[in-house]
Image (spheres, rainbow, N blue to C red):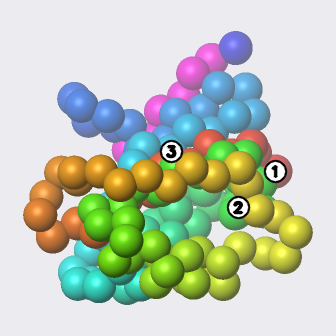
Amino acid sequence: MTIQRLHSNDRLSAVVSFADLLFLSGQVPGPATDAAGQTREVLAKIDALLAEAGSDKDHLLSATIYLKNIQQDFAAMNEVWSAWLSPGQAPSRTTVQAALARPDILVEITVIAVRR
């Protein structure tokens, strides 16, 4: 079986696939400045990468969500996340507080999915 990589550079690949498994690197937001907006931006990036790799959000197996300030931003992130998921299709999930790569990043999400 072959490992395939999409959108690679010297440090990472946005998607790595092996067989029917898809591993997405942590996705960070664009210009939004609040947790809800950043979550929407990150989920849009995830949607696009999953589609390019032959999958979608209904085929998520696992998600890890990193929040800069879990007490402040958990509810806003969770509201957007819950609205994005299709009913009955929630993956396993872990949410943690973390110091993220840039001070303006409030939300980062990584997922594992299976191809359709």
Residue type at mark 2?
Asp
Q: Which residues lie in the magenta part?
A: 2-7
What residue is drawn where x is 38% and y is 66%?
70
Sequence-first disc among 2 and 1: 2
- The quarter in which the N terminus is drawn is top right
Residue nearest the observer in this picture, 45 or 33: 33
Judge left or right: residue 102 versus residue 46: left
Sequence-first disc among 3 and 1: 3
Q: Which residue is identified by label 3?
A: 24
What residue is drawn where x is 24% and y is 31%?
11
Q: Is residue 57 above or below residue 60?
A: below
SS state under label 3 = strand
Residue type at mark 3?
Leu
Q: Which residue is identified by label 1?
A: 116
Q: Which residue is identified by label 2?
A: 56
Residue at the far top: name it: 1
Residue at the far front: name it: 71
Residue at the far right: name it: 88
Sequence-first disc among 3 and 2: 3
